Image: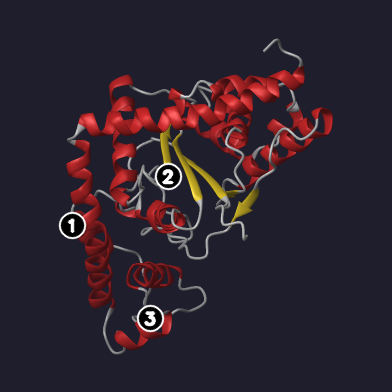
Amino acid sequence: MENTQKKTVLSCIQPSGALTLGNYLGALKNWVQMQDEFDCTYAVADLHAITVRQEPSKFRAQINSTCALLLALGIDPEKSTLFVQSQVPSHTQLAWVLSCYTQFGELSRMTQFKDKSAKHADNVNLGLFAYPTLMAADILLYKPDFVPVGADQKQHLEIARDIAIRFNNIYGDVFKVPEPYIPKVGARVMSLQDPQKKMSKSDENANAWVAILDKPEDIMRKFRRAVTDSEAKVCVGEGRDGINNLIGIYSAVTGKSADAIAAEFEGKGYGDFKTAVGEAVIEELRPIRERYEQIIADKAYLEEVYKKGAERAARVAFSTTRKAMKKVGFVI
């Protein structure tokens, strides 16, 4: 009989402020689609968020908001495991074990540590330095076949694989070594004000990025102010970063090809095109925002999702941690 068991996938996201259109088109939309093909585990990585100082009440609200938004996007807790990282103690327990199999030099070479140290020079803490070891624990606990990665997380998956291989070479087959998963579809969304940079919620210019939960009028304003060029022709071209970005966004939300978009706006100006992009994005995000408002207002439902997800995740995580610790020699 053919083995129809689904391959497993793990993805985590930090609850660190508003999630953007870039997060949605580049990753989160794929999370929803992957549920039909894979056995998915999704975590809100709140432990990672405290490498930067958090205001407790705001932080708590962001965790709730991120969970509610994932549900609004279409993450189905009946199909997938959705949980909050800090509610599964095995993450920090295994992270300590793995830290003893991670080399100082490996961590010191991590690009994100260098970047964040420069940005938060007054708070270069141990958690920021050891961040990749906790991320390795996040991954290895659930023995995923695949981990979706963008360019900014590739290094973290590589070090997780290195740690797993090192541990396995000493103690035998303990951890599954996951492969990177490159989504079939995904848009790299750039800043609306500086289209050579990736769209980011940390951008100080509020017009540079669109939040998934932005109001329609704010979305439209941001697109109408988006940077383009002086050619006033809607088509993809080399060195035309602004218009290329808008075409990419319009294509991602409508499914139209770049050639079809060029034909649609032949003879029309950038004003018409920016308005069309804004309208398309508004309609794409509208049902998500409406579902979010319903879910975030239902605290009992959110808590039920957290609890069930954490219980399910904890069973798998505890088993993996127990096996690793027994191999090391702890009394189990």
* Residue in the foreground of this view, choosing between 260 and 304: 304
* Residue in the foreground of this view, choosing between 244 and 15: 15
Residue to which mark 3 is pinned: 231
Residue to which mark 1 is pinned: 216
Residue to which mark 2 is pinned: 80
Is residue 299 found left or right of 113 in the rendered image?
Answer: left
| In contact (CB < 8 Å): disc 1 and disc 3 | no
- Quadrant of the image occupied by residue 32: bottom left
Quadrant in which the N terminus is drawn: bottom right
Q: Residue at x 22, y 64 (%)?
A: 283
- Could you tell me the amino acid type at mark 1? Pro
Mark 2–mark 1 distance (CA, rounded to whole Å): 30 Å
- Could you tell me the amino acid type at mark 3? Glu
Is residue 110 found left or right of 10 in the rendered image?
Answer: right
Mark 1–mark 3 distance (CA, rounded to whole Å): 28 Å
| In contact (CB < 8 Å): disc 2 and disc 1 | no
The answer to whether residue 163 of the structure is visible from this angle is: yes
Local SS, label 2: loop
Q: Residue at x 24, y 33 (%)?
A: 301
Q: Residue at x 40, y 42 (%)?
A: 202
Mark 2–mark 3 distance (CA, rounded to whole Å): 47 Å
